[in-house]
Image (cartoon, rainbow, N blue to C red):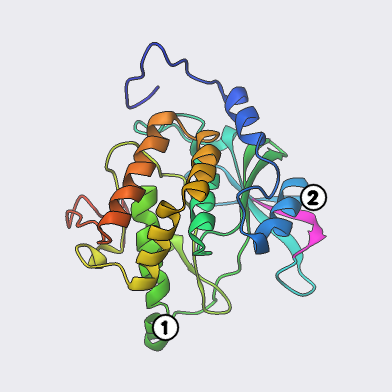
Amino acid sequence: MQGRERSAEVPELDDEARFARASSLAAGEGARDEDAGLARLLANADVSHIGRIVYSSNATFLLELDAEDPTAIDRPLRAVYKPLRGERPLWDFPSGTLYLREFAAYLVDSALGFALVPVTVVRDGPVGPGSVQHFVQGRDREVSARERDALEPRLQAMAALDALLNNADRKSAHLLVTEDADLRGIDNALTFLPYPRQRTVLLEYGGTALPDAIADAVRSLHDDAARRRTLRRELSLLLDADEVAAFSARLRELAGDPVYPLLDPWDGRPFEWW
């Protein structure tokens, strides 16, 4: 495996086995109740059109599915498709796992109830297995100062989520303001490394306390043994055991001491952070 050593007693899964293991999660499993129907559509609806999204570091496509978008009136269901075959090898992330990390990030967000990551599934697509994430239309203009202030609680929730995900790539471009002035976090593939690697444009929160509502959500997930076990089981189908254990440790630490990690002002910034 690239970027780290593995125990000789733990065999590496090949791409087919990883996808088969991830596919054992039923469509909609792990989704919030209000997301389950959309998740099933994303997982099962036929693909009617496909187009390439340019300027992405990995091969990324926009799918139009043979279904109506349940979140929008008279709009076809569209999704961002990131196939395994289009992943560019990285030195620090295991090859062929980025699409699984997109799905894992959604499951953690869903367990917390933040609704920051668009509904995401894994499925076999036009060019093979990959992640399929609900396409969310962004604003077509700059956010005003007043709107930015209104989004502050959502940015704080995003910063907490990224601390739990160990997100190594939270650029400004990965913070999407929706048409209805809400916030979504996209491009969540560089996550869940078992050692510290968080990089984020949200450095300003470092060292400050989580707001009460966000801290309560983190503690609630940690303290609910049944929910925590369910999430751990789901993540174990997508990630390696050491990555799942590291996530559990981050959850325990943030629940016990609800303070945003204090990151180095330079090393904590993502590449192309401006």
Compared with 211, 84 (above or below) is above
Q: Which stretch is magenta?
A: 62-69
Q: CA distance from mark 2 to mark 1?
A: 36 Å
- Mark 2 sits on what residue? 45
- At 69% from the left and 56% from the top, the residue drawn is 36
Secondary structure mainly formed by the magenta segment:
strand
How crowded is the residue under tag 2: few (<14 C-alpha within 10 Å), some, or many (20+)?
few
Question: Where is residue 188 shown, x and y percent of the image?
Answer: 46, 50
Task: Choose top left, top right, bottom left or bottom right for residue 138.
Answer: bottom right
* Amino acid residing under circle 2: Ala
- At 39% from the left and 75% from the top, the residue drawn is 153
Question: Where is residue 174 shown, x and y percent of the image?
Answer: 44, 60
N-terminal label among 2 and 1: 2
* Amino acid residing under circle 1: Ala
Q: Looking at the rendering, in which quadrant would you find the N terminus? A: top left
- Residue 222 is tagged as none
Furthest residue toward top: 8
Furthest residue toward bottom: 146
- Mark 1 sits on what residue? 150
Task: Choose top left, top right, bottom left or bottom right for residue 122.
Answer: top right
Whether residue 172 is visible, yes or no, is no
Q: Looking at the rendering, in which quadrant would you find the C terminus? A: bottom left
Would residue 182 be found to the left or right of residue 269 on screen?
right
